[in-house]
Amino acid sequence: MKKTLLFISILLMAWSAVAQESQVQDPQKKSRQKLYIQIGLGGGISTASSFDMLYKYSGDMANSTVSVVPVGLGNGFNGSLAVGYWFCKYAAVELAVSEFLGLPTQGDSVIHLIGASKATAKVRGSMLSVIPAIVISAGLEKINPYARFGLQIGVLPYMISKYTQDNSSTNPPMSKEIYNDYYGGVALGYTAAGGVSFNFTKLLSFFVEIQFVHSTWSPNHSQIVKYTVNGEDRLSELTTWQKQADFVWEKNVNGTIDVNQPRQELRSTYPFSTVSLNLGLKFRL
């Protein structure tokens, strides 16, 4: 949190400096003050992982092991729409809306250790973000290098876990499927990108960039949204306490259970950090 607050302070000071520089420009030089719209797509890999979500089971009853499967929510694809304003030839401010769609990470469950013939779990995350940023450009006409620094505000982060279990040793055989949604809260972090813009015309350019995002998120709630046994919907048979959870900083371990209320679980933090390759088009207005 301290690093995020420091980055916000630096961002605001830099933004203020750029604004002051623009005020001393000759007001007649309108050609230097340009709006633009930018659309981009990209894909990336995670640069940070959680180690307490998934496991990998191997061996047999005589010699078995369980190991950690790192889960990084930053594996996936992103799309963005941004509006920017060039204060001068070398600096602009930008506001982007970005949607990240994560790819699932698969592991086993420790349910293996109590007799299930096969049990797997998948986890993936997605997030809608708002990103205010500053862009610094070399100011070249045809091939123009640039850098961008911004604050990422994840306004709609969520995570989905899918658990499946198949046990052929029971009579009759049993299969189970559970979907659990994690939601609520705001993800905070920062972004940094470096790229090159290829100017086709005065109004259209193509860009390619490498972007780094560091962001963390702690959900407020979780809820089971699908629960089937042998293909039959059993969600209505679960109590509110079984289906829903509220994540808290502190909980009472000696209290009584109210099955009509969500259970309380201690908070966890999950990383949405990624490094991605992005490309897109920029339209000057």
Image (cartoon, rainbow, N blue to C red):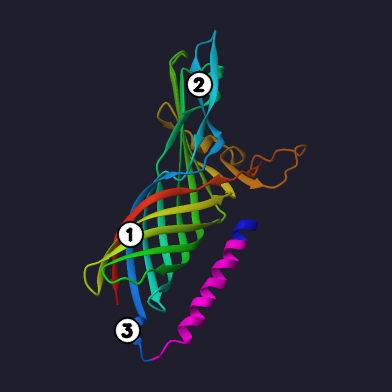
- Say whether residue 277 is magenta: no
Seen as rendered, the residue at the extreme left is: 201
Residue ID for mark 2? 57
How far across and how far down the image is residue 132, in percent? Answer: 47, 67
Quarter assignment of residue 27: bottom left
Residue found at x 44% / y 36%: 105
- Say whether residue 22 is magenta: yes
In this view, the residue in front, 108 or 30, is: 30
Q: Check if mark 1's residue and mark 3's residue have beta carbons within 8 Å.
A: no
Q: Earlier in the sequence, mark 2 or mark 3?
A: 3
Q: Residues within 10 Å of mark 3 (few under 14, many from 20)?
A: few
Q: Earlier in the sequence, mark 1 or mark 3?
A: 3
Q: Check if mark 2's residue and mark 3's residue have beta carbons within 8 Å.
A: no
Residue ID for mark 3? 31
Quarter assignment of residue 229: top left
Q: Nearer the viewer, mark 2 or mark 3?
A: 3
12 vs 205, left or right, is right
Q: Which range is magenta?
A: 6-27
